[in-house]
Image (tube, grey):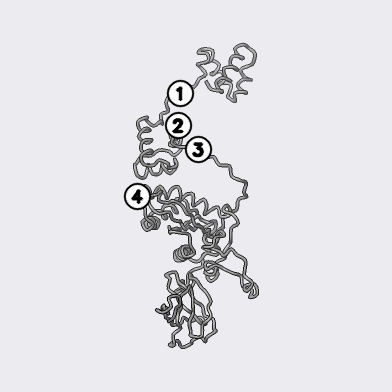
Amino acid sequence: MGQKELIRVKLMEMVKQKQRKLSDVAVVLKVSYRQAKRIYRKYREQGDKGLIHGNTGKPSHNMIEKTIQQKIIRTYREQYLGFGPTFAAEKLAERDGIVVDHETLRRWLLEEGDWQRKRRRAAYRQRRNRRERFGELVQFDGSPHDWFEGRGPKCCLMNMVDDATGMTDSFLVEQETTEAAMNLLWTWILWHGIPQALYCDRKNAFVLDREPTLEEQLAGIDPQSPFEKACEKLGIKVIVANSPQAKGRVERNHAVYQDRFVKELRLRGISTIDEANRFLEMEYLPAINKKFAKKPAKKEDAHVPVMKNQDFKNIFCFENTRVVSNDYIAQINRKYYQILKENKQRPHPGNRVVVRTWLDKSVHVFFKGKELLVKEYKLKQRKDDPNSLSA
């Protein structure tokens, strides 16, 4: 007998003992006077039992049979152990044709000890509203993780998430590097256009986190990383987050990947970066964006359209300035490049040239905006002096 029935028993007994009027008890129980009369009649005829609901103790008509419940629990343990109840319910319906509500599955797993509630108490943080248009702000980050659960190499997920919609694009690489960051942004631009702003943290792959040198201060130069330089050429504003929580959209998206993506890789037996990236592009990203992406508050696209024949190779590159030597050599990364005589507009010794290393590792030298004809000049070791080098 529950609390509700115990209260009714006490009140009906008071009516029976003529301590209270039935009309007053009806007000206390929040029922009509006619309903109160029916309750009192049952109490007089059957006693305490008359106030217990007729379905008490009976199984629900919607209850799943015990054999089916045991089958679902067994399937979960064999194939989806460690999956959250919501994700496991999706996979049971998708792969096994078993439809069960995620809350029902959660209750069963708690009873069986196969799942535990995760209680977190986060620090107070003020909510920041989403941007209103797609492409107005894109959050950018890398997530090193054991994505293959020991079946393959540890690697890093490079991930971009649009702030207005939650649209995501990503791929796996061996390490979180500037090249990987450039490649991901390049891919996003080819698909969607140039975003207005990029939100990232203080990692050397993204921004240059150092004070300017004395020479830079005298020249009024604000030091930038190659990634920042590429964004500046494209007109993308780089916003640096002071904490992981500041770019919570992409951080929470990492958690989704580390839960769902890891388990999808396990179900498919994928253990290499190439296989995982093919699965990401062909299946996972379309499905996850369809499931979680939202419509922006305003339908106008904030991305800047890509111009025809836009030269991204000279934008996403490592750019340095070098002084031409007396023998027309430009040096970069311990390599020497001879500026050929065939150039119509050839720099003089002492002039500065721009040396760009593309993402494919090829080196290109520019003078006054035009590419020069160059040839790598390899130094040979002298036979009589192994410690010296000469041509």
Quadrant location, the C terminus: bottom left
Q: Residues within 10 Å of mark 4 (few under 14, many from 20)?
A: few
Viewer-nearest of labels 3 and 4? 4
Residue 108: x, y in percent? 43, 33
Residue type at mark 3 is: Arg
Q: Earlier in the sequence, mark 2 or mark 1?
A: 1
Q: Which mark is residue 111?
A: 2
Q: Earlier in the sequence, mark 1 or mark 3?
A: 1
Residue type at mark 4 is: Gly
Q: Residue at x 45, y 75 (%)?
A: 387
Q: Are marks 3 and 4 in contact (CB under 8 Å)?
A: no
Circle 2 sits in a helix, a strand or a loop, which is it?
helix
Residue type at mark 1 is: Asn
Q: Earlier in the sequence, mark 2 or mark 4?
A: 2
Residue 306: x, y in percent? 47, 70
Q: Which mark is residue 55?
A: 1
Viewer-nearest of labels 1 and 3? 3
Viewer-nearest of labels 2 and 4? 4
Circle 3 sits in a helix, a strand or a loop, which is it?
loop
Q: Nearer the viewer, residue 58 or 153?
A: 153
Q: Earlier in the sequence, mark 4 or mark 1?
A: 1
Residue reaching furthest to the front: 384
Residue 303: x, y in percent? 51, 65
- Residue position for label 4: 269
Residue reaching furthest to the top: 17
- Distance of mark 2 from mark 4, alpha carbons? 30 Å
